Image (cartoon, helix red, strand yellow):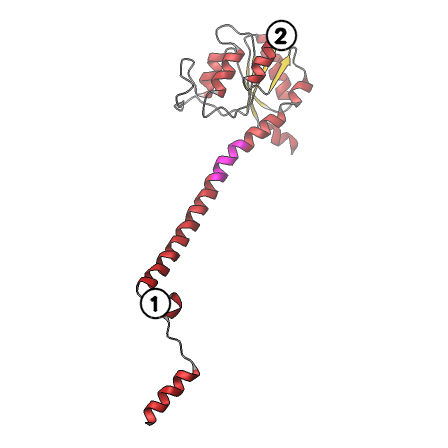
Amino acid sequence: MAVDREAQFHVLAVDDSLIDRKLIERLLKTSSYQVTTVDSGSKALELLGLREDQDISSPSSPDKNEIAVNLVITDYCMPGMTGYDLLKKIKGSSSLKDVPVVIMSSENVPSRINRCLEGGAEEFFLKPIQLSDLIRLRPYMLKGKLKEQQPSQHQETNSSTISSCSSNNNSKSNKRKAMDEGLSPEKTRPRFSSSSLALVSYEETA
C-alpha cells in the first residue's frame, strides 16, 4: 500500500546535464515516484502552464500542456534560466506558489544556498544526489497535498455557513413580521384555559 501512495506523487526534475537527469530519474523511480524530466527552466515553465516572459504578478492562463506536479527539483546552474530564476517564477505564481521547490548544485556556496532558501526553496541539495536526500522530499509533497485540499474544504464550510445564516435570517424575518402585526409568535395560535371556559358558560346561563 505504501508504494501505491508514493506513486501518486509526481516530481518534475529539471537539469541541463543528461547524466544528472538520468541519475535523479532513476533514484526517484526507485522511490516509486512518478517522474517527468526536462533540460531547462523554460521547458519546466511550459509544462507547469507558465510562460518564461509572463509577469509573475499577473494571473496565469491555463495551458493545454500543463501537468500537475507535487514537487519541483531543479539544478541551480543552467544556461538561460537558473534554478533560482525558476524558483522565483513558481513562487510568484498564484496557482503554483504552494508547489514545493528543491534546489540542487555541485557547488557549495553559502550565499547561494541562503538566497534560495530565503526565496522559498524547501531544501538545497549538494550533488551527487543520494537516495537518502530524496527520502526527505516526501513530507514536503504531503504538505503540498494538504494545501490543495484546504481550499475545497474551506469552500464547503463557507457554503454551509451561508445556508445557516440564510435560515436564521428567514426565521428573524418571520418573527419581525408577526410583531409588526401586533402579534407575538406565541399568540398566533388560540390558547384556552379552564378559567376562560367557565366564564363563557356563566354568560350563556345569564
The residue where tag 2 is placed is 109
Give the image quarter of residue 57. Answer: top left
Q: Residue at x 49, y 16 (%)?
A: 88
Query: Where 52 sits versus 196, above or below?
Result: above
Residue type at numbered disc 2? Val
The residue where tag 1 is placed is 183
Query: Where 15 sits versus 97, above or below?
Result: above
> Seen from this angle, which residue lies furthest right?
132
Q: Nearer the viewer, mark 1 or mark 2?
A: 1
> Seen from this angle, which residue lies furthest bottom?
206
Q: Main secondary structure of the magenta part?
A: helix
Task: Say which quadrant the C terminus sits in.
Answer: bottom left
Task: Say which quadrant the N terminus sits in.
Answer: top right
Judging depth in this view, the residue of 189 and 97 nearest the camera is 189
Query: Where 162 sits versus 110, above or below?
Result: below
- Residue 8 in view here: no
Query: Where 188 sits versus 204, above or below?
Result: above
Residue type at numbered disc 1? Leu
Percent x, y of residue 137? 62, 23
Q: Residues within 10 Å of mark 1 (few under 14, many from 20)?
A: few
What is the CA distance from the residue labelled 1 to the residue labelled 2?
A: 80 Å
> Seen from this angle, which residue lies furthest left?
181
Judging depth in this view, the residue of 200 and 19 nearest the camera is 200
Q: Which residues are magenta?
A: 147-154
Q: 166 left or right of 115?
A: left
Judging depth in this view, the residue of 15 and 147 nearest the camera is 147
> Seen from this angle, which residue lies furthest top?
79
Percent x, y of residue 56? 43, 18
Q: 89 left or right of 113?
A: left
**N-terminal-most mark, 1 or 2:** 2
Q: Residue at x 35, y 87 (%)?
A: 200
